[in-house]
Amino acid sequence: MEVTEVNRPDRAARRRSGKTDAVDAGAAARAVLGGHATSTPKSKNGPVEDLRVLKVVKDSAVRNRTQAINQLKALLVSAPSQLHESLAGLSNPKLFVACAALDPHANAVHQALHVLAHRIVRLTAEATTLTRRITAITQAHNPQLMELTGVGPDSAAIRLTAAGDNHERLRDEASFAALRGVSPVERSSGKSQRRRLRPCPMW
């Protein structure tokens, strides 16, 4: 089965016709039949798709870890003075270890810090494992990308995901720029010479 990627319709035309799924489907069909939509969509059955899903999960782990750290430190501010003073000045790794060692049955504050510390340790391990997996896939699929200055596993995964597994559908740098919404569009008028960036062609 042949699949064609259809760009988002003109906003003014969409407002006139409505914004229902049926109207959008009709507009997409007319674009394909009229030969206006000829782009090949990204395939989702290769290593780049693996990178995408792993990056989504890793980003979630990192966000939740940051939230847990902020919650732990906020609880320490209002914790009993004796506990607060015993943990003051510790670096983050030592603080998490100390909180994880607290007796969760002592009181509610100890239990909350204990739970948050263990959550932080677990999410850190998750993020580390996923980073290793992302690095391994990137090095196996496109090792030269990791050799570029300033490109780590996360930024490499983002770039590969943008291009997709079937990156041959991007003919040149201009088509990649259009995909990412950074290709210039002429907006000059009279003596005014200016350009704007074309938005990403997505529904």
Image (cartoon, grey):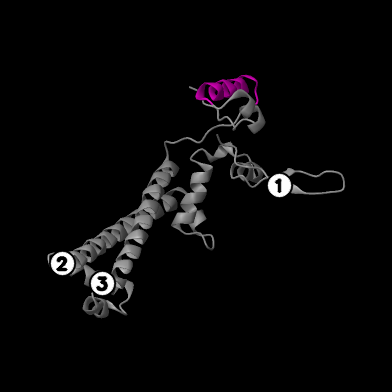
Residue 107, label in figure: 2
In the rendered image, residue 115, in percent from the top left (x then y), is placed at: 22, 61
Q: Which residue bears the numbered disc 1?
A: 196
Kind of residue at disc 1: Arg
Decide: marks 3, 2 in contact (CB < 8 A)? no
Answer whether residue 37 is visible to the viewer in this image: no
Give the amino acid at mark 2. Answer: Asn
Q: Which residues are magenta?
A: 20-36
Helix, strand or loop under label 1: strand
Q: Amino acid at mark 3?
A: Ala
Q: Residues within 10 Å of mark 1 (few under 14, many from 20)?
A: few
x, y percent for residue 126: 30, 55
Q: Does 159 sit above or below residue 14? A: below
Q: Is residue 191 magenta?
A: no
Cα–Cα span, label 3 and label 1: 53 Å
What residue did someone put label 3 on?
A: 79
| Image quadrant assignment for residue 121 | bottom left
Q: Is residue 30 magenta?
A: yes
Give the Cα distance between marks 3 and 2: 11 Å
84 vs 164, left or right, is left
